[in-house]
Image (cartoon, coloured by chain):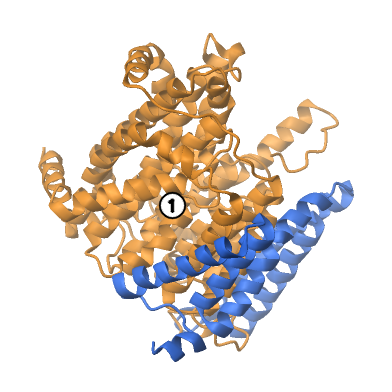
Chain colours: A orange, B blue
Amino acid sequence: MENLFNLLHGFSVVTSGQNLVLMFVGILLGVLIGVLPGLGGANGVAILLPLTFSMPPTSAIILLSCIYWGALFGGAITSILFNIPGEPWSVATTFDGYPMAQKGQAARALTAAFSSSFVGALAATLMITFLAPVVAQFAIEFGPPEFFAVQLLVFATFVGMGKGNAAKTVVSTMLGFALAAVGLDTVSGQLRLTFGSLDLLRGFDFLVAVIGLFGIGEILVSVEEGLAFKGIHARIRWQVVGETWAELPRYWRTSLRSVLVGCWMGITPGGATPASFMSYGLAKRLSKNGSRFGTGELEGVIAPETAAHAAGTSALLPMLALGIPGSPTAAVLLGGLLLWGLQPGPLLFVEQKDFVWGLIASIYLGNIAGLVVVLTTVPWWARVLRIPFSIIAPLIIVFCAVGAYAVHNSQMDIVVMLGFGVLGYVLKKLNYPLAPLVLALVLGDMGEAAFRQSMLLSQGSLAIFYSNPLVGSLVTLALLMLLWPAVSYVRDSLRRPAPAPQLGVP
Amino acid sequence: MEIAVAAGFVALALLVMADSIRVGRGWGSDGPEAGFYPFYVALALGAAAASILVRHWRLASSKHFVAPQELRRVLSVLVPTALYVGLLLLVGLYVSSAAFLAGFMRTQGKYSWPKALGLGIGVPVAMFLLFEKGFGLPLPKGPLENWLGY
């Protein structure tokens, strides 16, 4: 019951004049970011983060999280109308969304996409409302070994559950940790990995890295593919919306399954992109229309959109309750907490009630506002995409540069951003996952501190990670995850005497 | 390319390990030394990169990293961006953004000079009003802005 009162209080925080305006501004900016290729949730939020330095934290998080919801909605628009995913998590939406648009059912596909996004987000938010305080309560008892174990589990999950090459996931993670270690060591005050350079003294800021990796890197990937927006005009009539809504309950089974997949993938840091693919795959296998998937089935739009939105939203649960983000965008929001002077972690629920419940309330309202906004403004967004690439591309690059500079008022950061952009492009081409890199950059210092404090407690004995049942089971689970690729490799090669060489599965 | 990137990561790992040994990777009087943690991070990085290296070495794939056509498209954005960043360090963000926007529109989009210059100058002016006046967030400036009295 107490949670409900807190939530009601949160609603009153959000609906106070200025915050309500910020919510709509956030949604509109978010949809724009979601529609434009090259600007995504993570780097869009990172670029705008410096603008919120002077705001109260609650208003800032409402603005930024609404950008995130808007971006989640916006990704679907380009997927369905132009067959170009505005965001990685809407790739699976193109499979059936674009064929539907070609058949003249664009409005039906868009309505289904937006509505299922909304359902996914709503389900995940309900889960956050009731589960996050419990998890935080539980986590308040955590000491350094437990925190380190949770982090270990997070990165082990990337290795164990991630698609593609496990070694590449390890490289990406460790690269993030190594980059995080550059600069002043906070414990001993020694300089590490600076090689006498003053510019490296501050270390690498993950916001700059995010803007480079996802912003510049993404633009380079999109130009390489050669963009052309030859899409279908869309206008959503309310009659079609009503018809589609009447149709949606028929697919409750798919929706429910997608919600579960999404919530699971969001909490364990799988993220929205794998969640959408997994949900699409499951729907294809389990639905009785499965064989017609890819030709414009409504279910093929519902499944990935529900899961992507559920995952994107539930990624906030570990961020709020444990201080460990479940997705790159959640990582950026976590970085925002630090910049606004809030300490992420379980105590947030005790010390910053206004902030936490204001955020949770803004997820509810933001998604309702988002649904209304996207349903009514689709034709306008479709027109934005007709702006030629030779104008959009330099504009996005200029915004990236401004964003990277504004983090620390440092011109050097713009050069660093460019470097990360090239790195992001190359890694993306070679199928190295970028999410673990970003998460490791954010969590690097915290992870190292937790590890060293544990080592101090135990005087250098690793046995501390098996000192009580909780930390022991977390570490065991993490180790199992780490070994999983090896196990499945052995199993596969036993089954097939000569395994076909697999080069970076796309 | 796979091999080159993996080799680069192995080299990076060795570099980090060397530096970690320099600052001390062992156990000091007050607990783990500064290099303790990065050393093992680098060890894992090197091991994983080496395994990728070995695997691709044996496969000896000759697949192109990018087709020449694609490379040209990527460079058509990357080179102007690099020039932009270089110019930015010299003359500040506003002037370089104007030059970058106008130049990009002119060369890639084949826009007429008036259109390219219009947008190229309009956007930095709008940015100045938004960031400098609106949010009180000063952006890097160069000689032109000094001359104008900012």
Q: Nearer the viewer, residue A172 or A409?
A: A409
> Quick check: A143 above or below A187?
above
Callout 1: helix, strand or loop?
helix
Identify the residue shown where x is 46% and y is 53%. A42
Q: Is residue A437 left or right of residue A77?
A: right
> Quick check: A38 above or below A134?
below
Identify the residue shown where x is 39% and y is 31%. A117
Mark 1 = which residue? A329
Q: The C terminus of chain A appears in which quarter of the rendering?
A: top right
| Residue A345 point in image, percent of width and height | 31, 58
Identify the residue shown where x is 78% and y is 32%. A493
| Residue A327 point in image, percent of width and height | 45, 49
Chain of the residue under the numbered disc 1 shown in the image: A
Residue B25 appears in the picture as rendered = no
Q: What is the quadrant of residue B146 in the picture?
A: bottom left
Q: What is the quadrant of residue A296 in the picture?
A: top right
| Residue B115 point in image, percent of width and height | 56, 61
Residue A228 appears in the picture as rendered = yes
